[in-house]
Amino acid sequence: MSVFRFHEYKTLLVTGTTGFVGKALIEKLLFSTPNIRRIYILIRAKKGSKLDERFKKEVLESPCFDRLRERHGSGFNR
């Protein structure tokens, strides 16, 4: 059984999402395994920044997600 087939219809928890490996893992899972049920991410707060702002700035706006942006267009942020 392949790794991606194993994750189909599963709910996952990913920590370290703002780091390089965390972003790469999420991008690969979203790009290659469209049938993942849900991905929860754990982001710790940093002094002076709100979690949603940190998620947007450090994760969503990362170049790591460019091919997902191309695939989904304006629906990417949903």
Image (cartoon, rainbow, N blue to C red):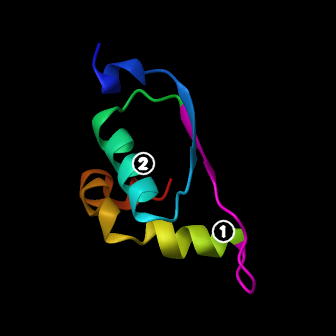
Measured from the top left, where is residue 19 in percent x and y?
A: 47, 64
Q: Earlier in the sequence, mark 1 or mark 2?
A: 2
- Image quadrant where residue 13 sits: top right
- Image quadrant where residue 31 sits: top left
The residue labelled by disc 2 is: 26
Amino acid type indicated by mark 1: Asp
The answer to whether 7 is drawn above or below residue 63 in the figure is: above
Measured from the top left, where is residue 67 in percent x and y?
A: 24, 57
Amino acid type indicated by mark 2: Ile
Element marked by disc 1? helix
Q: Which residue corresponds to the image point at 51% horizontal and 53% vertical from the top-left?
A: 78
Element marked by disc 2? helix
The residue labelled by disc 1 is: 52
Q: Which residue corresponds to the image point at 50% horizontal and 73% vertical from the top-left?
A: 58
Most foreground residue, 3 or 38: 3
Q: Is residue 41 left or right of residue 32?
A: right
Magenta stretch holds residue 54: no
Q: Is residue 34 left or right of residue 42?
A: left
Measured from the top left, where is residue 30 in percent x and y?
A: 38, 42
